[in-house]
Amino acid sequence: MTSQIKTVGVCGAAGTMGAGIAIVAARAGFKTICFDTGEDALARARKQTEGFFGKSVERAKMTEADQSAALAKLSATTQIADLADCDLVIEAVFEDLKTKQILLEQLDDVCPSHTLFASNTSTLSITEIASGCARQDKVVGMHFCLPAQLMKLIEMSPGLNTSDESFQAAWDWTVQVGQMPVRTQDKPGFILNALLVPFNNDAIRAVEAGVATAGDIDTAIKQGLGYKMGPLELIDLIGLDTQVRLCEAFYPITHDPRAATPPLLSRMVAAGHLGRKAGRGFYQYDDNAMFGG
Amino acid sequence: MDYAIISHGPSRSFPDGDDFLTNAVREASITVHVGGGAEADTAKTAVLVELTTECLGVYTGEDAGKEGSNMLGFARYRNGDDPPSNLIELVRQPNSDEAALDAARAVFEGAGFQVAISADQQGRIIDRLVRPKYNDALRFLDEGLAAAADIDLTCRLGLGYADGPIERVERGGLVHHYEVSQRLFETYGTPGYAPARRAQVAKQRADNNE
């Protein structure tokens, strides 16, 4: 079925993740239609994509001819009807079950019956996302890592009603575009976030419990375990508000106390200490340069 | 900065022949006790006590949150049977002597180690944070979330870890993981620290073979 995938649609393509997924598809030679609701946002994403490809050429990671070819494969639209020719549609819209369910219902009406739908959800159930859709056998989980255009890993998850054929076709496509898929069950957070969200919360609780400063915790984890980033540096990077949203997605499903929002995290978000983007989180930032713990 | 070693037995932090042992002097104002023992000596700038899973308070006694002296704890982090890492977790109490802390840091950094300061809490920093993750990974394996190789690959590719949790905890030894987790579980009582089934099996097999 992979060979039948010629055209790929990306929903939420103006977002960081969606734009990255579109780059992956176009770079591999697939006609790629970027769908989002705002023209300005799509134009910004296009400019960022051009910049990314430009840097790839500068660093000799792609030729100018490949750059031109990839950009020629990309188009943008605010009309969902323009996805009618897609063989595979990957959604990377807001991490909300209802939003994703409504999108898939709309895609059901637009796309031909053979079209595969893939969800880039990091926390929600593929089975539940597919539940309002008329083609539940053709819905798969396809969780890219941020930034998608650089990270090879994809967590691939079949829903309860996903057919083996659909899953295999989606899997084969990820290999064809140069990614590295791993198979997981359709469980909250799959592998990555199921391990990471509670671990990051534990690091926050360790700060709150006075075990060590953020700087000492990050030093210990990096030096002792060989991680590239400490957990508190990572939370600052992804945003403390995002960590709260992850907790709110996980805890009601898993009832794992480690997944519950740590009180310190709630207080820091309330105080506007959202991490790197706000200039202050577990560290303070000046012109994006980290200067203290 | 000079330091003297007082050995009470084999050291997990500094195996025989380690540069830190060979570079010690006979007499110094800083004494480093390794291998499970300690003696208070208020005349010294700092008395450093190697810890395994026990707290520093076991050696110093505690005083309703007012404890602290020139005696500090330390452990060079080591994943079970793996060679020791370059990290020293330096353990302080609420009223630890600041000059002793400065001296201890200078000794370890002078020997080329990275130092992270931890309160005297069970598991210090790394074991407190990482053992629940290993328990989760072992549980995911039992529940069929993914194959062990895929769990490890996901962490290496997706999170940039040097190795995955399954390969790491197995390499370090599941019995060691059981013992550290059980100690944490006894202290904190939270389910994340309860040793995973695979660690319990390894422990039972080790006990049966003794």
Image (spheres, coloured by chain):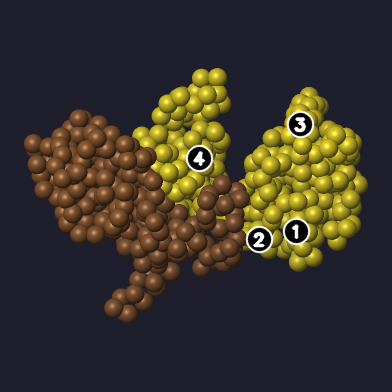
Chain colours: A yellow, B brown
Work out which quarter of the rendered image holds the C terminus of chain A and state it. top left
Q: Residues within 10 Å of mark 2 (few under 14, many from 20)?
A: many
Q: Which residue is mark 4?
A: A229
Mark 4 and mark 3 in contact? Answer it, CB < 8 Å: no
Q: Residues within 10 Å of mark 1 (few under 14, many from 20)?
A: many
Mark 1 and mark 2 in contact? Answer it, CB < 8 Å: yes
Q: Residue at x 45, y 63 (%)?
A: B171
Among numbered discs 1 and 2, the one appearing first in the sequence:
1
Among numbered discs 2 and 3, the one appearing first in the sequence:
3
Asked which quadrant contains residue A219, the reply is: top left
Q: Which mark is residue A171?
A: 1
Labels 4 and 3 share a subunit: yes
Q: From this viewpoint, is residue A202 visible?
A: no
Q: Secondary structure at mark 2?
A: strand
Among numbered discs 3 and 1, the one appearing first in the sequence:
3
Give the Cα distance between marks 4 and 2. 25 Å
Q: Secondary structure at mark 1?
A: helix
Seen in the image, is A148 located left or right of residue B199? right
| Residue A205: percent from left, percent from top | 38, 41
Give the Cα distance between marks 3 and 1. 31 Å
Give the Cα distance between marks 2 and 3. 35 Å
Asked which quadrant contains residue A56, the reply is: top right
Q: Which mark is residue A58?
A: 3
Badge 3 amino acid? Glu
Badge 4 amino acid? Met
A87 vs A125, nearest the viewer: A87
| Residue A191: percent from left, percent from top | 57, 55
Judge depth for marks 4 and 3 and give the one in front. 3
Give the Cα distance between marks 1 and 4. 30 Å
